[in-house]
Image (tube, coloured by chain):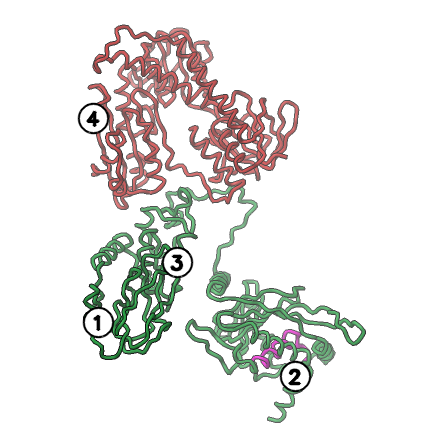
Amino acid sequence: MAEVIILPKLGNSVESCILLGWKVAIGDQVSEGTVLCEAETDKTTVEVESTASGTLLHLFFQEDDEVEVFAPIAIVGSEGEDISELLEGHSSTEAPKGSDTPTKQATTEVPSQVSQMQQESSPQATDFATGAPVSPRAKSAAEQRGVPTAFLQGTGPGGRIIERDVLAYATTHEPLTPAAKDQLQGSLPPAVGSGVGGRVTTRDLHGTSAKQPATTTLQAAEMVEVPLKGVRKIIAERMHHSIQSTAQLTLNSYADATYMKRLRERFKALPQEHPLAKVSLNDMVLFAVAKTLKEHPHMNAHFLGDKVVQYGQVNLGFAVDTPKGLMVPVIKSAHTLSLEEISVETKTKGAACGAGNIDPDSLQGGTFTVTNLGALGIEHFTPVLNTPEIGILGVGAISLRPIQRGSKVVHISHIALSLTIDHQVIDGAPAARFLKDLAEHIKNFDMLFMEKAYMSNKE
Amino acid sequence: MYDLIIVGAGPGGYVAAERAGALGKKVLIVEKGALGGVCLNCGCIPTKTLLTSAKHYAYAKKGGEFGVEIPEATFHLDKVIDRKDGVVKKLNVGVAFLMKHAKAEVIQGEATFLGGTKIEVNGTTYEGKNLMIATGSSPAMPPIEGAKLPHVVTSTELLNLREQPKSLVVIGGGVIGLEFASFFSTIGTEVHVVEMVDEILPMMDSEMSRMVRRSLGDVTFHLGAKVEKITETAVTYTDSKGTTEIPADTVLMAVGRTPNSQGLESLGVTMNKGWVEVNEKMETSVPHVYAIGDITGKSLLAHSASRMGEVAVSTMFGDGRDSMRYHAIPWALYTLPEAAGCGMTETEAKDAGRDIKVGAAQMKSNGRFLAESTAKDGGMCKVVVDAKTDVILGVHMIGGLCSEMIHGAAIIIEGEFRAKDIRETIFPHPTVAEVIREACFALK
């Protein structure tokens, strides 16, 4: 006997939901608890489960339909069963999923009116629309609150703009005046305007026009205005994007730097023209990172929204402080390079960045980044991911740490390490394992160095 | 150490004290005169008290038209002044209560500015984290021959006149001059207004300035007239037609106001002809020193001063988002009949290069106005709208109690409402305010 599945009441105040997508298709076998579809309420998205077992015989709604609670959404029964009676019992006999027939509902007239209103109130909306789909519930919420959906970042499935995106925008942004809404074009309206109660007025949209007196700041002598442009602007955009689009987690650790330091002292004692004479501690860390990344390919990856791409080649970015701002040149195939080759790369690329004549290609294609504030006395910090990379290592200053050796406490030089990962795609434990192995390589840097020399000799 | 020291307890200073007090700030407010400033003691409030008496008198005289005969209405200036004093006193007490409620300390005395945020009052030095200059303005006395004669007075003295003058010459056709002209002409004094430029009320829509002039039928206007000298019995002026002498037993000097900037030099704030320069956050050129109200010369109105005080308090103690906006400050003229306006006039909008549409509605076509007015009364409402965007730029009115509905225009302009938004808004009926909505339907 076929059974009708209804949309359950999903909360006290929920009257209806927007169907975001079916997880099952007609003909599928479902059992009690099988997730049938995802639905969006005014607060969250929920999974609707089947309350019966059998073959899915009919779906009453399509994606994006608004469904009232307790409405029938699907029929489950035995294959080939006659369900016409059940269908008749429910006035809404929708074309099933996959059909080309446009959705018809009890509220057919309303959506067409809504779209007309939208066109009227924001005629330029399509000029700058991101093209991201907008759920009907989000659309109506945006209508009510005057939220320009074209500017929203959707957090629904596939970047779809759903109601909570609209509500989040509305709570952090002051409303636009009716005239400002009319004149909204191209640019993003500010969160707070200069109008009454912080409303965004037409003046805020058009900047300070000639007719409007410019903001006079009499105490200007105490302030310096620096326009955001060039490298700074790119950094601002990228940093903001990074923080907005990732779930950053920073792990802090130390590595025994005794051998690394000792080796460095010996390199420094070499004649100036020796290729190893100019190797810095940072070069040595880069060398160790490249080696460790090769062993942990999950850290040498890009997160591209719907997938993670792991790379066999380590293209190691390293942060350079320049007069124009932070730049990150990339050492291609760093895992194949010897310590002196890495050292040459960092010197030439770092100098080119400082001089402002770096080849733009050298700033691209990184798979992991290392940034170093150790020389400035910083121990630990929280590096910001260089998206779409999923890891960045912050290298801190070397300090003495007390270590118990038998009954004695000795003070050993340690270098501070801060690893930021994108927790969306990498968990704390695998990242910690990477950091542990890196610390181990640094601790045994002399071995790592010799191993590399040995391997290349063998080749 | 006070969080804020305010010098001047007018509608700017005392409102700022109230707001800062509400935020739990320690406030000291210094006043050399009476609490409430010009507004409460010799401006807004007392003039309205007098004008109300004049209105009652005028209604009594034309009561017959409403079927109410009052055979012998008489006007007693002496009693009117007593009543005015009573109202002012009540409000003085009211402000004192507000200060107490705000836990603001009030000191009676003249402040000496010691530089920075330090002042001295009655021999004691006080220091605040912030200092607010709210010293206001005084009637200006131009250097005209005879201006120092005893019968030449300012609005302050005229408010205490207990004997009705036979004739009054008002020098200056601005708001202050016209309210006194309206009052004295209504109670039977022969009133002349001498104005230097070609029309009274320069901030007003020119069509309406003419209407105000005509509605004050008992007042004689001399426009484009320059006062040459004042004698014990007459005022002499020259205009395009030559020199004329008008008899006067009292002369009101109402040609404008000058800043109360004595002693401000020691602060080192940037000033322009005595007015203290401020930005839209009410900051002066000296850190932690703010100026609000008349002393800034930006807008010499009590309600502007109050708002400036609030903006300054928000700059000092709030999130700093609040700014002073001057494009939607309403003004009102309490003559019989009243006039009021907010935003751009037709002329101002055209001068600013705006492509505009104008809609007007007559008071005589309004139900309530007709029901409550005499056959002679009239007036109109005009809305100025941007032709391209439909945004309402200005609303101007004359007739009835339009001062009581001009705040609607302020909300419309602050909110950047379009004429179509007002057409979609329901106004109560019957009210005179419906003329605003009607004017939006009459746009051409």
Label 1 residue SS: loop
Q: Do the residues indicated by labels 2 and 3 lie within the same chain of the protein?
A: yes
Measuring from the top left, give residue A220's x and y in whole percent: 53, 44
Give the red chain's letter.
Answer: B
CA distance separating discs 4 and 2 = 98 Å
Label 2 residue SS: helix
Label 3 residue SS: loop
Label 3 marks a residue whose chain is A
* Residue A363 in sight from this viewpoint: no
How many other residues sit within 10 Å of disc 3, few (<14), some (14-19) or many (≥20)? few
Which mark is drawn over residue A100? 1
Q: Amino acid at mark 3?
A: Lys
Which mark is drawn over residue A448? 2
Left or right of B315 on screen, residue B397: left
Q: Amino acid at mark 2?
A: Leu
Q: Nearer the viewer, mark 2 or mark 1?
A: 1
Left or right of B164 on screen, residue A243: right
Q: Find the magenta span and give its range.
A: A274-293
Q: Which residue is mark 4?
A: B364
Q: Nearer the viewer, residue A159 or A316?
A: A159
Q: Amino acid at mark 1?
A: Asp
Label 2 marks a residue whose chain is A
